[in-house]
Amino acid sequence: MKSFSRFMNFIGGRDLLFGLVLLILLGIVIFIYTKISFIFTPVVVILSTITPPIILAFIAYYLLNPIVDLLEKVKVKRIWGILIIILGISGLLTGIILLSAPAVEAQVKELIKNFPIYLGEMGNSILQWIQNSIFGDYYEQGYNWVVSYFSDIPGMIGTYLGDAFEGIRNVASTVTNVFVALFTFPFILFFLLKDGDRFKRYFIKLFPPRSRGDVQQILHNMDVQVGSYIQGQIIVASCIGILLFIGYLIIGLDYAITLAIIAAVTSVVPYLGPTIAIIPAIIIAIVDSPFMLLKLAIVWIAVQFLEGNFVSPNIMGRTMKIHPLTIIIVLLVAGNLFGVIGVILGIPGYAILKVIITYLFVKFQERYDHYYGVEYGFYQDTDEQKE
């Protein structure tokens, strides 16, 4: 009986029953929501509208807050430091865009115009290779199947015409949301930089006094993990873009600045981003010449070597402590669940989840040591117990 009581206390006692009741009530609420979800459509629209600028503001907050803190340490008032940083970066970005926009615009237009031609030439080269290889006998069969399958293209177009109009409407809605996000996120960023600590203190006060220390520690660990990842990944992606731009110029690859910008943007997503970025460069290099493809491979290997051995270790450090295989799995799962947003925010979300699970595991260790440690051995090491 005593052992049973100790086990009940270990798993939570009355707190466990209270938690189970809360989970049951939550399940009932979710079930009811699925039946009357149409009532909450305005709430979903509001959340989908305000979430993108908030995400952008938090990303910019983690990039700019260390600079604002540094200015505050040198006796610059915080509000003036925020204004100086925001106006300075806005002016710098505006200048860069105005100076580079003509060249980038010309390259982008030319690339959009010529990219189908590159794909066609590459496809013809592949077909010629297939026809002259051992797979040549199967080529005619595959070609006839494709022709028969797509013979009713006009009917297929008519069938999917309604979906096309729906897609155009979704694109228009997306463009509108992007403009709203870009217009509103600077205001959210300003108040995050100005009152971020105040928001955090207010949030901590919502919890019982005995839990506030733990909540503060969890928020601090989340802040360190997410902040270091965002800052490091943006810097690493920028370095990759600059190195590739220099390499493309050296080997004479067409559309160097456009391909470098694509690589910098996609490299924000680790592992998968660089793989996506190299595809258009490979297509252009293949059409140019086999020697250009070889030079591209040398540039890419050199950039990846510099990034993996010098850039990332010194910028990212080992703060995240996430195995590369774990990162790939997280990106694949988050991408399937939430699309592009999931791929971008998957690793920060995993870092937050890791902090929470680590905290819960530590609490589990403490409870085990309290109820079972003396009799069955402490869960933690003896040296940790002495400390």
Image: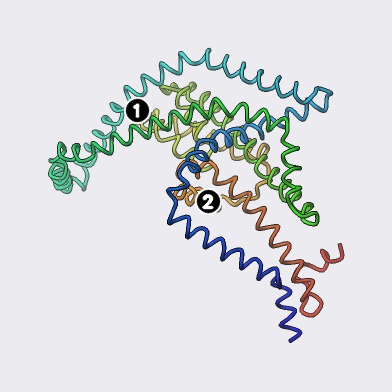
Q: Residue at x 71, y 47 (%)?
A: 219
In this picture, is 13 found above or below 136?
Answer: below
In this picture, is 378 found above or below 333?
Answer: below
In this picture, is 92 found above or below 304?
Answer: above
Horizontal relation, residue 386 to residue 134: left or right? right
Would you identify the image quadrant in which residue 156 lies? top left
Give SS at disc 1.
loop
Q: Residue 80 — which label?
A: none
Along the viewing direction, whichever of 126 and 387 lies nearer the viewer? 387
Q: Which residue in the rendered view is the most extreme toward the right?
A: 386
Along the viewing direction, whichever of 30 and 85 lies nearer the viewer? 30
| 2 or 1: mark nearer the eye | 2
Which residue lies under the disc numbered 2?
330
Question: What is the crowding at mark 2: few (fewer than 14 residues within 10 Å), some, or many (at least 20)?
Answer: some
Q: Residue at x 32, y 23 (%)?
A: 114
Q: Which residue in the rendered view is the most extreme toward the bottom?
A: 1
Residue 67 point in image, percent of width and height: 73, 28
Question: What is the crowding at mark 1: few (fewer than 14 residues within 10 Å), some, or many (at least 20)?
Answer: few
Which residue lies under the disc numbered 1?
289
| Disc 2 from disc 1: Cα separation | 37 Å
Q: Label 1 sits on what residue type?
A: Ser
Along the viewing direction, whichever of 49 and 151 lies nearer the viewer? 49
Would you identify the image quadrant in which residue 253 lies? top left
Q: How many labels does the image show?
A: 2
